[in-house]
Image: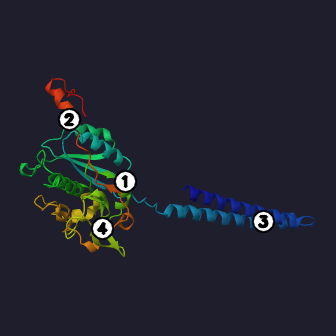
Amino acid sequence: MATRMKLKLKTVFVLYFMVSLLGLLYALMQLGQRCDCSEHDMPKDRTISRLRGELHRLQEHMRNSEATKQPQKPQANPTIFVITPTYARLVQKAELTRLSQTFLHVPQLHWIVVEDSPHKTPLVSDLLAKSGVTYTHLHMPTAKDRKMQEGDPSWLKPRGVEQRNEGLRWLREDRRAQPGGDNQQGVVYFADDDNTYSLQIFEEMRSTVRVSVWPVGLVGGMKYERPVVEGGKVVRFHTGWRPSRPFPMDMAGFAVSLKLVLANPEACFDGEAPMGFLESSFLQGLVTMDELEPKADNCSKVLVWHTRTEKPKMKREEALQAQGLGSDRAVEV
């Protein structure tokens, strides 16, 4: 708008200057000549009148052009819908605090937090309310026969299955209820609360058409796992365990377009999938390897890490509790 105003003022100034200059030149030409002023003033007046008329027509044309020109609506960034399963443990608040403060720096992000619980807990409710992030708070307990027990290795059973599926269910219902054609624009990402994310990864995934992919660091007993890209296409995967899986990727290594999720209402995570096949159970019906969209400089840069917070050792706390001297339970950690 400021640029258009400058151009308009510049045009008006130039036209006024030309009119004044022509009048001055005409006056100079008449100096020293005897004339019948009434006779010679008439052509001059007609010239000035004609120039002023031309100026008026130009100004009117500019006003009409401005009125008929349709203002362009600025292109909004697609919303990134991040689905995060979470469960109660000593480090839960610390994990969610770190993650929420990362999300604060990501524009157009909607955080869908799903607790593994029969009800919403005050800890998560209060944290989300104070986070400053646009969020939806859900809950869905894991079935007892699929729940991890104390001491079980992390790979024994797939975690977060019911919670991710609940996030997908809510997202589909919410988008159907939204009016307008923009309700299918967006990207869906599954972000666990114990990972570390570069802000760049969110801008990389924002342009996802179907399914975008990238490397994940510190996962699968390796420095990184990644899709291998040749000629702009994913041709195989660099992974140390069962590379023959349909999609041997970590949950943090892909994003899916919202439109694709909505077009496939049955797509979900299979809690009965064999170990390591959870991601494949969701992706198989959505995309082929040839359709994967490599991001992060053709999958050559690590922008997300599968970090895990070390489980705190509570031996001294337990000893003090046995003496009745344990930490105040009212202090939320």
Residue 227: give its label.
4
Kind of residue at badge 4: Pro
Q: Residues within 10 Å of mark 2 (few under 14, many from 20)?
A: few
How far from the left and from the top, in percent, is residue 220?
24, 59
Kind of residue at badge 3: Leu
Give the Cα separation between the discs numbered 1 and 3: 65 Å
Give the Cα separation between the discs numbered 3 and 2: 93 Å
Q: Which residue is at the front of the view, 96 or 183?
A: 96
Contact between marks 2 and 1 (CB within 8 A): the answer is no
Q: Earlier in the sequence, mark 1 or mark 4?
A: 1
Q: Is residue 71 left or right of residue 279?
A: right
Residue tagged 1? 198
Give the Cα separation between the discs numbered 2 and 1: 31 Å
Q: Residues within 10 Å of mark 4 (few under 14, many from 20)?
A: many
Give the Cα separation between the discs numbered 3 and 4: 72 Å
Q: Earlier in the sequence, mark 1 or mark 3?
A: 3
- Report the residue at 38% width, 62% height from top: 301
Residue 22: give its label.
3
